[in-house]
Amino acid sequence: MSRKTPSKSERYFTTGLTMITSRGNNGPNVMAAEWVMQISYQPILIGVFIHKGSQTLKNVERTKEFGINVASQDQTTGVNIAGGYSGTELDKLKIKSIFKLIKPRKIKTPLISGCTINAECKLVKKQKLGDHVMIVGKVVNIRHDDSKRPLIYHKGRYFDLGSSIEQDRVKVNVQKDTMEFFKNIASEKFVVKCVGVVVESKKKILVIPRSKTILDMIPFSVPSPGMNQRDHLIKFLKQIRLNLQVEDIPIMKRLILKNGKNIQRVNFVLFKGTIRKSSKITKWKSPRQDSLIAGLI
């Protein structure tokens, strides 16, 4: 079986590395795979792309099951062996001191110890795509190890996951009542997604009072998922009887609100607006008076 050597551009993809376990007439087998991904939450489905003609594919076609073993940074040798030899060439899992097998709970195919994730899968779909075959497995049992870090593959070399990267959010210190207001809106969601309008006049910003709070803020609302942001904003402005002309081009502001040890992430999709007619709601505030408003302009 011959394989095309990847071009320079193809090597710039960055992937994780997974060892796929299977079992056949000659016993258990393992192969290394880059193209492995979760494709559904309910049920949990995992897609694997395998080169046609591989021993693993033959095993999975026969047994209708396979194991997903997401490699940790300590398993470079195991991954190299799993990917460097075919099951017809060598009984890889018997190599001394390389692979330690663990017993599965829901399938008969063994799993590999020391991985970040071990998932037991039942085959639910097989489809040829290009020069590979996609197999999709339904996860019937899954476990993970928090103490392990995943192994990364890029340009033919192995990498550690490394340190996390802080997102480009503006940190804004807010009063306790402001924090409580947005915490209530969030209802324990990781990020509150808001849409609002910014109207400027004489270096001040149009604000409206929020009901049952002492918070004066730009006109904004929290749309339901899937709703067009601008359409929702215009509908909201009509509901509060604020007659504004809303521009088409959005601005994105990503904030982290902080009050002591409490934090809340908030995304604001903002549109510039102008007052069409005089309105009963015409309260203005200088950004210097409010750190949150200052963070939005």
Image (cartoon, rainbow, N blue to C red):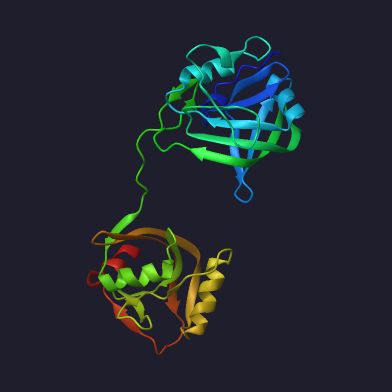
Is residue 17 toward the left or the right of residue 63 in the image? left
Camera-side residue of 197 and 202: 197
| Quadrant including the C terminus | bottom left
Q: Is residue 297 visible?
A: no
Which residue is found at the position 61% from the left and 16% from the top? 5
Rendering quarter of residue 85: top right
Camera-side residue of 87 and 162: 87
Q: Position of residue 253 (x, y in %)?
A: 39, 59
Establish if 121 lies above or below 112: below
Residue found at the far top of this picture: 89
Which residue is found at the position 57% from the left and 13% from the top? 94
Labels in figure, total:
0
Q: Position of residue 206 (x, y in %)?
A: 35, 77
Camera-side residue of 104 and 251: 104
Rendering quarter of residue 192: bottom left
Camera-side residue of 273 and 36: 36
Q: Is residue 76 visible?
A: yes
| Quadrant including the N terminus | top right
Establish if 94 lies above or below 141: above
